[in-house]
Amino acid sequence: MELTTKVTITGPARKLTFKNKILMVGSCFADEVGNLLKIHGFNACINPFGTLYNPISVISSLDRLASGTPFTPEEVICTGPRKATVQLYCSFRHHSRFARSDAREFLDNANERLKDAAQFFKEADTIIITLGTAWVFRHLATDTIVSNCHKIEPKEFRREFLQPEETVQLLEKFTTKHPDKEFILTVSPIRHLKDGAHGNNISKAALLLAVDWLQRKGYGNISYFPAYEIMLDELRDYRFYAEDMVHPSQQAVKYIFERFTESFIAPSEYEQMRLNLKKHKQTAHIPISV
């Protein structure tokens, strides 16, 4: 007896193996899946600028990796309210975890990370993009869509919505520029309830439409993994969410990764994946049954 609606997944003809070099960019769901890939023995680089949520920030970051252009002092900003007692330095392209108390320290760290990630990008044959939201924030003074507002005064930004065709254009331009790479697109199952329930649903729908339009164009190097649909249809229960009722629980992430494995990873790698996971658990002193 079937108790859930099973999501049909059409995987790519060429499955992933341990020989692939995989770049993961996007929402924190990309971090979750990327970490599982690494634990299972895959060569993966995960969010070299930190977590990214909107399509503009994702593609802008990928363009930066492709060019390898170093970050400059002009791109460094002070984070948080202007009257904050402790001032940190970061950039609008980075997640707040990159922030440092010294501007030079931030810049040196950011460029060291960029150098390594840009080299990885050149060698990568697979890029997994996880889109989180179609809502973006534009910094008015610089007329720039930011990856993170860094708790700067809200009046310095304008909230905007990306239409599906804008996301299609962004993804299409980048993927056609790099025909040597395979792209796996997915929409994050993490809910952005700061936009409100309706705003979150509209946002996810816009991203899903964009991915669908792009796939209908028939690009051979683009495939889609339905993480969002699996969360909503196969795991349709609040027990599969973490306590914040926003992020998938660890059980849900594990299940979604299993579905990814079934469709996108070559069966020839399954046994070694199992052994790698066992070794990881032994090293981390995690019970093997977990």
Image (cartoon, helix red, strand yellow):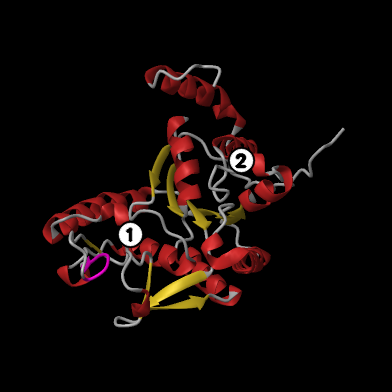
Q: Secondary structure at mark 2?
A: helix
Question: Which amino acid, mark 1?
Answer: Leu
Which residue, as the protein is rendered here, is positioned at the far right? 1
Q: CA distance from mark 1 to mark 2?
A: 28 Å
In the image, residue 80 lies in the stretch drawn in magenta:
yes
User: Comparing marks 1 and 2, which lies closer to the viewer?
Assistant: 2
Residue lying at 72% horizontally and 43% vertically, measured from the top left: 234
Residue 159: x and y in percent read: 46, 76
Is residue 100 placed above or below 63 in the rendered structure? above
Mark carried by residue 65: 1
Quadrant, the C terminus = top right
In the image, residue 249 lies in the stretch drawn in magenta:
no
Mark carried by residue 256: 2
Tell me which label, 1 or 2, sits earlier in the chain. 1
How would you classify the magenta stretch by its main secondary structure?
loop
In this picture, which residue range is highlighted in magenta?
77-82
Residue 237: x and y in percent read: 70, 43
Mark 1–mark 2 contact, CB under 8 Å?
Answer: no
Quadrant, the N terminus = top right
Question: Which amino acid, mark 2?
Answer: Ile
Residue lying at 34% horizontally and 82% vertically, measured from the top left: 140
Of residues 206 and 85, the one nearer the viewer is 85
Q: Secondary structure at mark 1?
A: helix
Residue 154: x and y in percent read: 37, 74
